Image (cartoon, grey):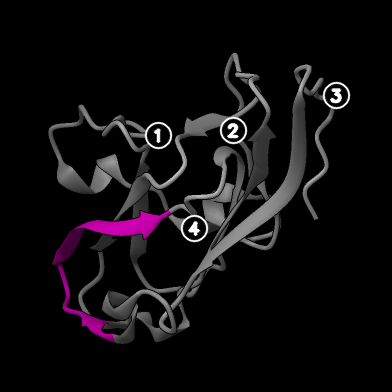
Amino acid sequence: MYRPQFPYITPANCTDQRCVYSYDKTNTPVLNTTLPAGQSIHRVPLPIDKDADFYLRGVVTPDIGLGLQFRLDDPLGHALSDTDNVLNPLNFEFPALYSATDGAGIEALDSDDWGIFCQQGSRLALFLNNNSAVAIDLSTFVLNLHGIKRYSGGCR
């Protein structure tokens, strides 16, 4: 369960509600496929609800083994990990590296607004890379985005 190290202050005239977006084969069709060895899938859309802005504060994904790597881009197209490496596989992260418990925990993401800002109705982008010599079944891959929805009456 996500719990921030320090309390976040909600701006006046706002209400924050804890939220988890979960993406898997049931709501993201590309995850119901197999990723061939050495191949990548780019810009899989991860939609955010239209009812409130979302502040991404943590990422959880299980380590399904093999050589599956992933990367996230925020709604403005900014990568949330390194993208300037000469070798493409170095621009992705292994899910097990996102926690000390091999993918069972949460990696906190913070910014000046106490999270990565995602405007209501926007989309993050998921990139997947198979860095192994065998095909990977993506049907067991699950990505959980933890954060808050900020409902406003004039705040920002």
Report the mark closest to the observer, 4 or 2. 2
Mark 2: which secondary structure?
A: loop
Q: CA distance from mark 3 to mark 4?
A: 25 Å
Residue contact at pointers 1 and 2, CB within 8 angstroms: yes
Residue 6 numbered mark, or none: 3
Identify which residue is drawn at 61% across, 26% down.
110
Amino acid at the residue labelled 4? Pro
Magenta stretch, residue numbers = 33-47
- Which residue carries the number 4 mark? 95
Q: Which mark is residue 80?
A: 1
Q: Do the CB atoms of the residues marked 3 and 2 lie less than 8 Å apart?
A: no
Q: Which residue in the structure is indicated by mark 2?
A: 109
Residue 17 magenta-drawn?
no
- Among numbered discs 4 and 2, the one appearing first in the sequence: 4
**For the point 28% across and 60% down, which residue is it?**
128
Q: CA distance from mark 3 to mark 2?
A: 13 Å
Mark 1 vs mark 4: in front:
1
